[in-house]
Amino acid sequence: MGQSDQNIDVRALGKVAVLMGGSSAEREVSLMSGAGVLQALRARGVDAHAFDTAQGDLGELQRAGYVRCFIALHGRHGEDGTVQGALELLGIPYTGPGVLASSIAMDKTMTKRIWRAEGLPTPDWRQVASSAETEAALAALGAPMIVKPAREGSTIGLTKVTEPGQCAQAYALAARYDPEVLCEQFIEGDETTCPILGEGAGAHALPVIRIVAPQGNYDYQHKYFTDDTKYHCPSGLPQAEEDAIQRLVVQAFRTLGCRGWARADIMVRASDRQPFLLEINTSPGMTGHSLVPMSARAAGISYEDLCLRLLASATLDTPPGAAGGLPA
């Protein structure tokens, strides 16, 4: 992150807003993330305050004297570049990737196009606009197939399809959340996730987490509200596989122009142990069930220190005063 925790001057961080809640389908999780971050920052002596973007005007951040934002929002209008763009206009530095990287990463189809163009492995896919096209995608990609909204997170609206008769319902569910629906080849194997911290040449991966969900069903409920899912960190994978995943996620992070932090989801195909990138989350969860804090802990970084490091890394795409103006 560029600074050790001991070298971070908490007073210099100024008045901080922890952005949480919001209006997306992930509002409930965001409120939990934000509450955890807020408590951690205050425990480190930061002048931090909760700010629910669904209930407050972002312009109030400037009027109230906030000089830095920790984005604990998830989903639409939180990690899709919109809030980031607003903060750029307000000139308030924020955590996580900038406008373009956030916008691209939120769109799973666009992300996969870029990764594929850069030679990074990601499962085959089709973008569909009807249940008939979903059936055609199943014929092309094979069963099982994942059907999900292209621009949602936390497995919201996701269905694992095994036969044509399920396609209409799967498409309707995904389309309820997003008119852009993604059909993706299912990779049978180990489900893993890996956080990345830093920027550019300084970006580095934290330990890999291997996820074992009941019946392989890692859905919204199992992510946040039950203890049935097992998380292995250390992953228990061979060191060579762990290293390969870490190299891959750093490449994926840099390819999209991310900075600050993110968490990439990867499937390791059972047949040949090939890792495949599924998606990258640019404002990962920070709840009691969340995975970035778990991985950081395995690397010797406490939850509070992680929050402080991320806050200290807050920045803008264009530093104040650097944008210039239109010629007279």
Image (spheres, rainbow, N blue to C red):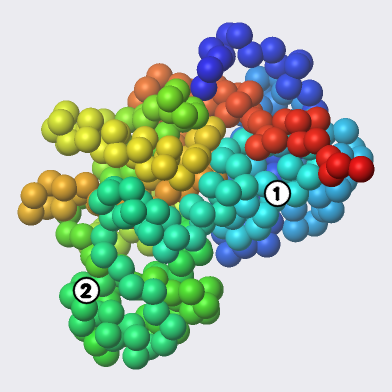
| View extreme (front): residue | 328
Q: In 3D space, how far apart are the residues under numbered discs 2 and 1 (Cα atoms)?
A: 37 Å
Residue occupying image coordinates x 46% and y 45%: 256
Tell me if 287 is positioned left or right of 184 in this view: right
Q: Taking 146 as reference, is 102 above or below it?
A: above
- Residue 5 numbered tag: none
Residue 146 pos. (x, y %): 31, 70
Q: What element does badge 2 sit on?
A: helix
Q: Position of residue 64 (x, y in %)?
A: 89, 38
Q: Position of residue 110 (x, y in %)?
A: 45, 60
Nearer to me, 146 or 104 = 104
> Closest to the observer: 187 or 160?
187
- Give the amino acid type for the residue marked by disc 1 in the picture: Gly
Describe residue 307's horizontal placement relative to residue 299 as left or right.
Answer: right
Would residue 198 appear left or right of 114 to someone viewing this image? right
Dots 2, 1 in contact, CB < 8 A:
no
Q: Nearer the viewer, residue 148 or 234?
A: 148
Q: Which residue was labeled with disc 1? A: 85
Residue denoted by label 2:
141
Residue depicted at 43% across the width and 37% down the height: 254
Q: Secondary structure at mark 1?
A: helix
Picture residue at 24% right of the left edge, 80% below the top: 138
The location of residue 287, given as percent across then percent down, is 52, 43
| Residue drawn where x is 51% and y is 54% of the image | 104
Type of the residue with mark 2: Leu
Q: Hey, which residue is sitting farthest top in the picture?
A: 6
Task: Please tell me which of labels 2 and 1 falls first in the chain.
Answer: 1
Q: Is residue 276 above or below residue 216?
A: above
Q: Is residue 155 visible?
A: no
Place residue 167 in its image quadrant. Answer: bottom left
The quadrant of the image that shows the C terminus is: top right
Query: Is 313 placed above or below 183 here?
Result: above
